[in-house]
Image (cartoon, rainbow, N blue to C red):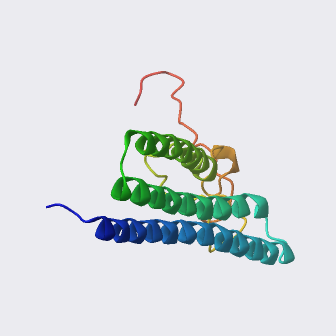
Amino acid sequence: MIRTTGSETIYNDVIEKIGTTIDAAGVVMIVVGAVIAFVVATVWLSRRDSYVYRRFRHQLGQAILLGLELLVAGDIVRTVAASPSLTTVAVLAAIVFIRTFLSFSLEVETTGRCPGKARQRRPPFDHERPGVDTGSACPAMRETAAGAPMTRPKRNKDPAGSGA
């Protein structure tokens, strides 16, 4: 099927508008997420909650991650659907590589683990008990559900070495 120049131009314009809309949604997501994280952190500070900075960074990082995902999607729509040439695909690959690296870095920064690793059984912090860090990488900093610091169970050592 041979396309006419007029319909091809309309198609490219529509794809460009869709890509721009997705980009705008990504930027809005980052800005709104930053504002929400700031407001929530201000409330936490007024209540004198602990770990405010860590929780603020976590929320801000998640907003940036979602915004980056939308920006990458917008680039893909515009590049692949509109006029895929070797140059535009190479530029897209570079942009996606940089944004993927940023997303990877933010994921490690906000969750404390590499993407693809098994999630911890508990969330990084307990929203029902603010200030209790249940997901700390340092076992000495974790607290049990009762609020007491976790300690290693003591082993019963048989001085005779009989094992019974």
> Where does the image place residue 46, in percent across and percent down from the top left?
86, 77
**Image spot of residue 61 (x, y percent):** 64, 58
In the rendered picture of this protein, how many numbered marks are placed on residues? 0
Say left or right for 70 vs 138.
left
Rendered location of residue 40, percent (x, y): 73, 75
Q: Residue furthest front?
A: 5
Looking at the image, which residue sits at the far top?
A: 161
Q: Is residue 143 left or right of residue 157?
A: right
Which of the pair 157/64 is nearer the observer? 64
Please state if 96 lies on the left or on the right of 147 as rendered. left
Between 157 and 10, the residue placed more toward the observer is: 10
Tell me what residue is drawn at x 50 percent, y 41 percent: 97
Query: Looking at the figure, which quarter contains the N terminus?
Result: bottom left
> Residue at image x 44%, y 45%?
88
- In depth, the one of 25 and 39 nearer the eye is 25
Q: Position of residue 66 (x, y in %)?
A: 54, 63
Q: Is residue 57 above or below residue 157?
A: below
Furthest-left residue in view?
1
Q: Residue at x 38, y 65 (%)?
A: 12
Q: Is residue 156 above or below residue 48?
A: above
Q: Is residue 156 left or right of residue 90?
A: right
Give the residue at x 47% y 61%.
74
Q: Is residue 15 visible?
A: yes
